[in-house]
Image (cartoon, rainbow, N blue to C red):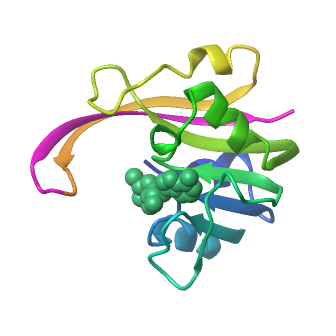
Amino acid sequence: MKATTILKKYFPPPATVLDAGARDGSTSERLRAAGYNVTSIDIESKSPDVIEVPIEEYEGVHDAVVARLLVHQLKGSLSENLDLLASHVRSGGVLYFTNFGEGDSWFKESADAWLKDRKVLYKELHVHTRPTYAGDMKEWKVWEYLVEIK
Ligand SMILES: C[S@@+](CC[C@H](N)C(=O)[O-])C[C@H]1O[C@@H](n2cnc3c(N)ncnc32)[C@H](O)[C@@H]1O
């Protein structure tokens, strides 16, 4: 997956970006290097550059929100979680997110219903065999989306 490449192509800098669920901040770093003004948040910060706050309590609004491998970890339904992320995007901005695809053990729900009346700028399914954090090999199926927020 390549959040920075996709954002640069469809929504080039300068722009403010919220990296939600930033973990160690590595995606944030790539976005900063590409010229974005990035705020990084995570429920459990693993870097001094990542603010420790859950997305549910965060109050800022940005030109773009990046949420890589986050929606399946939030408490609501997929639609509720996407509404929450979109509420942090200004009108005319974009939401980049990934969602596990059908057949992946993390798959919960398709994003298609939520996307139905929205302008999808980019959509692609990635299937690859890679190790999990635990080290065992797994076939990952991950949808990647960039959506305009009205
Ligand atoms: C699977 S990791 C993905 C990390 C990173 N975005 C990436 O692509 O490598 C999901 C991250 O979301 C964070 N997270 C989970 N619930 C969250 C919440 N409610 N608000 C903010 N971050 C959350 C976790 O702590 C974890 O770092």
**Residue 98, percent from left and from top:** 50, 39
**Residue name at image x 54 percent, y 69 percent:** 30
**Residue name at image x 49 percent, y 19 percent:** 110
- Judge whether residue 138 is colored magenta: yes
**Residue 83, percent from left and from top:** 72, 34
Q: Nearer the viewer, residue 37 or 121?
A: 37
**Residue 42, percent from left and from top:** 55, 64
Q: Nearer the viewer, residue 61 or 37?
A: 61
Rendered view: 82 above or below 9 = above
Q: Is the magenta stretch mostly helix, strand or loop?
A: strand
Note whether residue 4 is visible. Answer: no
Magenta span: 134-150
**Residue name at image x 9 percent, y 49 percent:** 136
Q: Residue furthest bottom?
A: 48
Q: Nearer the viewer, residue 121 or 24?
A: 24
Q: The C terminus appears in which quarter of the rendering?
A: top right
Q: Nearer the viewer, residue 77 or 130?
A: 77
Rendered view: 118 above or below 15 = above
- Judge whether residue 85 is colored magenta: no
**Residue 33, percent from left and from top:** 60, 75
Rendered view: 68 above or below 112 = below
